[in-house]
Image: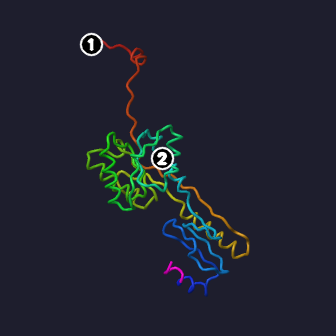
Amino acid sequence: RELIRPTFHNILSVASGIIYLSQYPRDLTGIFPKTSIPIVIAFGISKDAIPCVNYDDANGAYLATEHLIQAGCKRIAISMTKRLSGYTRALLDGGIDFDPKLIQLSDWMEGSGYLCAKMLLNQEPHPDAFFCQNDSMAVGAMKAVRELGLCVPDDIAIVGFDNDRFDSLIEPSLTSIAPPFEQIGQKAFECLLEKMNKTPVSGSWKLECKLIPRSSSQKKKRAEPPSLAALYRAPCRFA
């Protein structure tokens, strides 16, 4: 707050409108000084009368968890709490019981993803999938899985969040949730133009995320044993 307010006072003398872009969706209530210049927040929230544009975290978590369930996973660990609503809703819709032992608190770093995965893999039975808070943590989880002699994705499927540029370059390539960053910017700019044209604009928008499936969550389907009926239909061979 101490840094933002002086900066805003300098900008207000030359700006016709402001889009404030946050590094993450933090609460910005009360940060901005009262002004007649239109302000829109992109990637942040506020209880002030300022339009806010974000992505739908719960939607992204639901897509990731649903995807892992469809891949055949039953024990899906999650390394965060902020996206629990979408995660638990997908479990409920998929007929899977919620297990609090599969939740691990963490920060955003690769090393944290590694440590979280190591602790979760010490459980019995261990998870068969990880939904990580971001893609760096997912890379750390991959390292932990390999150190235990397990395979991604056949033993442990992994999904990250953010759809970073390196996701398609690592092995196996990383399935991730892509937030609509470009669409957030477009919507914020549209809101700002409307406010500058004196059109009443208020409220907030949550734009939907997108699942980007790659190799890290594509479990190989194990061959089903032949049925008795199939064996009876098979032609007999005699030596």
Magenta stretch, overall SS? loop
Q: Where does residue 59 sit, x and y in percent of width and height?
A: 55, 52
Residue 9 relative to residue 78: left or right: right
Q: Residue at x 60, y 77 (%)?
A: 18
Magenta stretch: includes residue 4: yes
**Front-most of 136 and 229?**
136
The quarter of the displayed image where residue 93 is located = top right
Q: Residue at x 69, y 73 (%)?
A: 195
Mark 1: which amino acid? Answer: Ala
Residue 95 relative to residue 151: left or right: right
| Circles 1 and 2: CB atoms closer than 8 Å | no
Q: Residue at x 55, y 65 (%)?
A: 182
Q: Does 193 sit above or below residue 209?
A: below
Residue under pointer 1: 239
Separation of disc 1 and disc 2 at Cα? 52 Å
The secondary structure type at the circle numbered 1 is loop
**Front-most of 16 and 12?**
12
Residues rendered magenta in the picture: 1-5
Q: Where does residue 179 sit, x and y in percent of width and height?
A: 52, 59
> Around disc 2, counting alpha carbons within 10 Å, would you say few (fewer than 14), some (14 to 19), or many (20 or more)?
many
Point out the tag, 1 or 2, that comes first from the N-terminus: 2
The quarter of the displayed image where residue 176 is located = bottom left
Mark 2: which amino acid? Answer: Thr
Residue 83 relative to residue 13: left or right: left
Q: Does 58 sit above or below residue 54?
A: above
Tag in front: 1 or 2: 2
Q: Where does residue 199 sit, x and y in percent of width and height?
A: 73, 71
Return the mark for residue 65.
Answer: 2
The secondary structure type at the circle numbered 2 is helix
Q: Residue at x 42, y 39 (%)?
A: 74
